[in-house]
Amino acid sequence: MPTPTPFVGLGDINTYQLLPGSGSDGLTLIDTGVKGVESLEVFERGLKEFGFAIEQIERILITHAHVDHFGQARRIRDRCGAPIYAAPLEARRMAGLSPSSADRRPHVVAFMRRWGIPDELIFYENPMAKRAADLHDTVEVAGTLGDGDVVVVDDLRLEVIETPGHCPQHLVFYEPRMQWLFSGDHLLTDISPVPLLDLPEDPAVPRPKSLVRFMESLAKVEGLEVRMTFPSHGDVIYDHRKLIEGYRLHHERRKLQIEKKLREGPLTPFELAVDIFRKYYETQIFLVMSEVIGHLDLLEEEGSVVVELDGEVERARVLH
């Protein structure tokens, strides 16, 4: 069921309701949409079309802690009493215990300055990012889910699969008998998921390589037998392997673009961002840097590029 979001270029978010079988009258909800009057009204109308109401929801599953996925979880929970489940790291963020890496805390600012980003862009306040605070309520989960867990919904068995990349502990839900995959933002029809930077506060903790992890997660779901993939945005996907191959091609092209540019000479990650994302870097610096740093991580993993500290900033250069 699509419900509206205010994010330009993102459009509606699909929330999924698993209807009860003969032995139950309760619904299982996967993701909730953003907090908002219009979103809730559209959600309720959609349920009513099938003869159901919010009060009949008996559990809520959250794929990850972005506001369009859990924003109105608390409002729905307060109406129906349904327990909420999410991965541990995402649950912390939903409860407000773990701020987003995009927040301009001192360690995030230090990372950005090291990548060569000027302060006026580091501290630029994107109006939509600022509004995101109004699109969700913090909420505590009743329980956590992880790899190997199974959620039983009448005669359906949803296998929980961790697919980190887009965020630290993204979950997808796989029903092997029906060959259904509820893919959250891991696989999307019309949008290429951005593996967002995850910046540790402790300097002794290595920075997780989000795009490297995303590519590993793609391989994880590629082997599943899937007839229909239900993404969080866009239409149903009927060939998830073809989509994954398209993602790989996209990232190969981006790597080649970056490597070609670096053959002209060493550059800071920000200089690469300005060259590649000229229309977007000023207003979407965190998304843009997630793309650039992610592909530099891939190139470093392959041994074709090295990123070194040059004074107070990092510079990338080709090795051969």
Image (tube, rainbow, N blue to C red):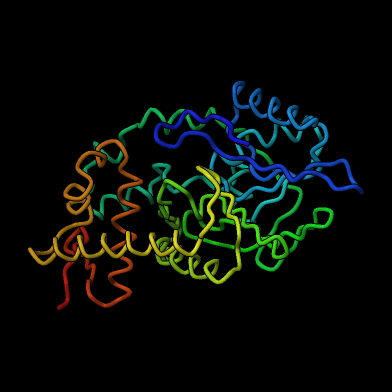
Tell me the quarter of the image containing the N terminus: top right
Q: Position of residue 258 (x, y in %)?
A: 20, 61
Q: Is 270 left or right of 89, judged from the image as shown?
A: left
Q: Position of residue 246 (x, y in %)?
A: 38, 60
Q: Is 316 left or right of 19, judged from the image as shown?
A: left
Residue occupying image coordinates x 62% and y 63%: 161
Q: Nearer the viewer, residue 162 or 271?
A: 162
- Give the tally of numbered discs: 0
Q: Is 154 left or right of 176, judged from the image as shown?
A: right
Q: Is residue 307 above or below residue 191?
A: below
Q: Quadrant of residue 114?
A: bottom left
Residue occupying image coordinates x 25% and y 42%: 281
Q: Is residue 7 above or below residue 99?
A: above
Q: Nearer the viewer, residue 96 or 168?
A: 168
Q: Is 97 left or right of 125, judged from the image as shown?
A: right
Tell me the quarter of the image containing the C terminus: bottom left
Q: Quadrant of residue 27?
A: top right
Q: Position of residue 89 (x, y in %)?
A: 59, 55
Q: Nearer the viewer, residue 23 or 211?
A: 23
Residue occupying image coordinates x 22% and y 61%: 314
Q: Position of residue 226 (x, y in %)?
A: 60, 63
* Residue 311 makes an appearance in the image: yes
The residue positioned farthest toward the left in the image shown:
264
The residue positioned farthest toward the right in the image shown:
23
Residue occupying image coordinates x 39% and y 60%: 247
* Residue 83 makes an appearance in the image: no
